[in-house]
Amino acid sequence: MNPHFDVAVVGAGLIGCAAALYLARQGRRVIVLDQNEINRGASGRNAGSLHFQIEPRMVDVLLSDPQRLSELIPVNVQAIEDWRRLQAELRCDLGIAMHGGLMLAETDAEHDLLVRKVELETRAGLTVRLLDSIELHRIAPYLSDEIRSASFCPDEGHANPRLIAPAYAAAARAQGAVFQLRARVNALEWHASSWRLRLRAAEVNAEAVLIAAGAWSKELLRPLGVAVPLTAVGLQMMVTQRTASLIGHLVQHVGRRLSIKQVEAGNILIGGGWPAHLRAGGDIGEVADAELQEMAIVGSVAVAAHTIPATSNLSVIRSWSGITCVAPDHLPVLGAVASLPGIYIAAGGSSFTLGPTYARLISELICTGDASMPIGLYHAERFRQPYLRSA
């Protein structure tokens, strides 16, 4: 007889493990399935940034539809609260440091973009302010003289991505959630009023299914006639040797690919969007892994040195890659699949920074049919494909 659960979660990354905990706390019988191990995807391979300001990759939306983008900010504000209490909630050290973040500008056009961004964020409730060159270099003397202004959010920072999902998984197990790893879901089938998930040598039945498989979410839904508009993106990060205290903030640049911060041990983590190469092409269904690109490493180091000159004296001791996915407007896909009762999705767009909040909201939706915050902005009907229903 096939085991039967209330909810099957596909994907043992941050969102999947967190959702398992929140669902189990509500008395749901939960199983988490993953084709690999816990936290082996983007949740464990990103740079760990907690970036609550509007990201540079969302600039097109900021310019074309600022009102729509402003609807994202309340979730960012809620995510700040969720991260601040997470270590107490999970009762372990997660490497969380929220000592402020800077979004830099060095041209007139970039400065004007920051002004628009800060105005929108402030109206929507995010604590953020614009710093001129004098104040900026007073609080961040490590920055290049080329940097003329920045927006500052006192709540930004970083966490250790190797610790978050495993901590959620441990807490979910303590609440009774079952984890079945190295168990690839080969098919989802509707059978006798529930969903049957076909694995290599077994089957699992569940009343509801949450697909939180990152870049592979699209592949799982495609055979069911649901074309989720997600694109695979290669992640590439690097870390330098340890050095004396230098960078006191999470630093991003509104016009260049850069995300940089210094962790407690003294190493400096550099990321920001320089891509890894997706092996076997760009289609999510064919992606096997992401490979480091030498030119991307060179470009990333060059931007870091341009922005923070002292980093030019440091050696890069390790680089790594991963795979994430994004929707056309860089916002997540989060909600219920209207054409497939009992199927839910949580994938794409800031899934580390906003992952704990996304997991709680989607769990509320599964348990009660509603979420405590509006999530209609994230439904795929925004792409004029009518397969997700509003919460």
Image (cartoon, rainbow, N blue to C red):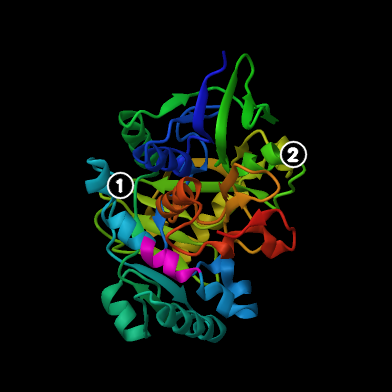
Question: Alpha-carbon distance for marks 1 and 2?
Answer: 49 Å
Rendered location of residue 384, percent (x, y): 74, 63
- Which residue is located at x 25 percent, y 46 percent? 89
- Secondary structure, mark 1, is loop
Q: Is residue 44 magenta?
A: no
> Residue 242, which numbered label?
1
Rendered location of residue 30, percent (x, y): 45, 31
Q: Is residue 73 magenta?
A: yes
- Which residue is located at x 57 percent, y 49 percent? 347
Write down the region rendered in magenta. Answer: 72-78
Name which residue type carries label 1.
Arg
Q: Vertically, is 58 above or below 8?
A: below
Q: Tell me the residue that label 2 is attached to.
A: 224
Magenta region, main secondary structure: helix
- Which residue is located at x 73 percent, y 36 percent? 286
Q: Vertically, is 52 above or below 147?
A: above
Q: Quadrant of residue 25?
A: top left
